[in-house]
Image: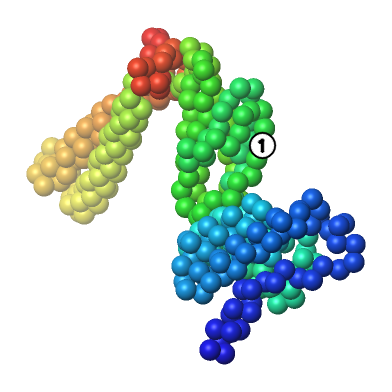
Amino acid sequence: MGRLATVALALALALPAQVAHADEQPWVVGVSEEAKTAAKKLLAEGNELFLEHKYADALDRYRKAIARWDHPAIRFNVVRCLIQLDRPVEAAENLDLALEYGAAPLEEGVYAEAVAYQKLLVTQVGQVELACDQSGVVVTLDTEQVIACPGRTVRRVAPGRHLVLGAKQGFQTRTEDVVVAGGKVAHAQIALVPLGRTTAVVHRWPTWIPWVVFGGSLAVLGSGLLLEDFAAGRMSDYDRALTRDCAAAGCGPGHPIPPADQQLESSAKTYGTVGTAVIVTGAAAAVAGGVLLYLNRGQVKDIEVGPTRGGGAVTFTTHF
């Protein structure tokens, strides 16, 4: 019972005794005694439900109490319920209202609790900053309209992926995924392109074709260089063999070059001839690949955009 009594005391929020000149306090101005009495009754009912862990019902009572008297202490009980219901975004928004006037309207212990919740919620809630400069554009965040442009706004959201959409009659609808982390701010600038007047980067051929030609030419060129290197090695072997076999008696009409040495010379010349031909072919292909890359460079072309039956847009690219 001692623990329940302590909790009940914390929840009771007898609405701190008002100091002198209460009529000057913002949370009291314009509130009739009848409204205060009704709000306190709803507050008491909400407290009982909260202690029974009926947080949704307690939240309903607290909101009805706020409708009669928007006192920061009652507003903080809304925050307590929303936290229990795992609704941190709404909790953070209501906590701002509960702390709007600082510690003055709250009991000391309640104010300390509110500040602790504020630090906790910072890590559980992110923000999206949305901006749009085009007049008449409607921007929605997760299907909720947030801006009638031109304008700028910052909205609290739960961490994760959120959908931003900008739409205007006669303009191409734009959608953008925004990923928000807890405690961070994500930014989205919405700018729409008029239907019938947009551009795109296009190429003459699929971009992989010139690169395949160019890459293949380098492979051929490399093969030719390897053959030339092999031919040079064979020729070096021939020179060494000729020096060895012809050093004593010399090589001439009476002493022909040994057949093995002649074979080395012949193969060296053959590899050299083939290597040269491959190099020429590879170089020509490389030039052709370079030309294709140049001709296939991206070009900005106008495209026509028209509305579809589903409200989106269909594009038709222009021809070269």
| Of residues 246 and 298, the one drawn nearer to the viewer in this rendering | 298
Q: Position of residue 52 (x, y in %)?
A: 47, 73
Task: Tell me what residue is drawn at x 22 percent, y 32 percent.
Answer: 274
User: Image check: 138 left or right of 233?
Assistant: right
User: Image check: 156 left or right of 242?
Assistant: right
User: Image check: 241 left or right of 8?
Assistant: left
Q: Is residue 279 visible?
A: no
Task: Tell me what residue is drawn at x 40 percent, y 21 percent.
Answer: 311
Q: Position of residue 116 (x, y in %)?
A: 65, 72
Image quadrant assignment for residue 25: bottom right
Residue flagged by tag 1: what amino acid is it?
Arg
| Of residues 310 and 228, the one drawn nearer to the viewer in this rendering | 310
Residue at the front extreme?
34
257, above or below 96, in the image: above
Task: Tell me what residue is drawn at x 55 percent, y 24 percent.
Answer: 192
159, above or below 167, in the image: below
Task: Tell me what residue is drawn at x 38 percent, y 9 percent.
Answer: 319
Residue at the right extreme?
21
Rendering colour mode = rainbow
| Of residues 64 and 189, the one drawn nearer to the viewer in this rendering | 64
Screen quadrant of the C terminus = top left
Q: Position of residue 254 (x, y in %)?
A: 11, 41
Image quadrant assignment for residue 108: bottom right
Q: Position of residue 28 (x, y in %)?
A: 79, 57
Secondary structure state at the residue bearing disc 1: strand
| Of residues 151 and 219, the one drawn nearer to the viewer in this rendering | 151
Quick one: label 1, few (<14), some, or many (20+) residues within 10 Å?
some
Residue placed under numbered mark 1 in the picture: 152
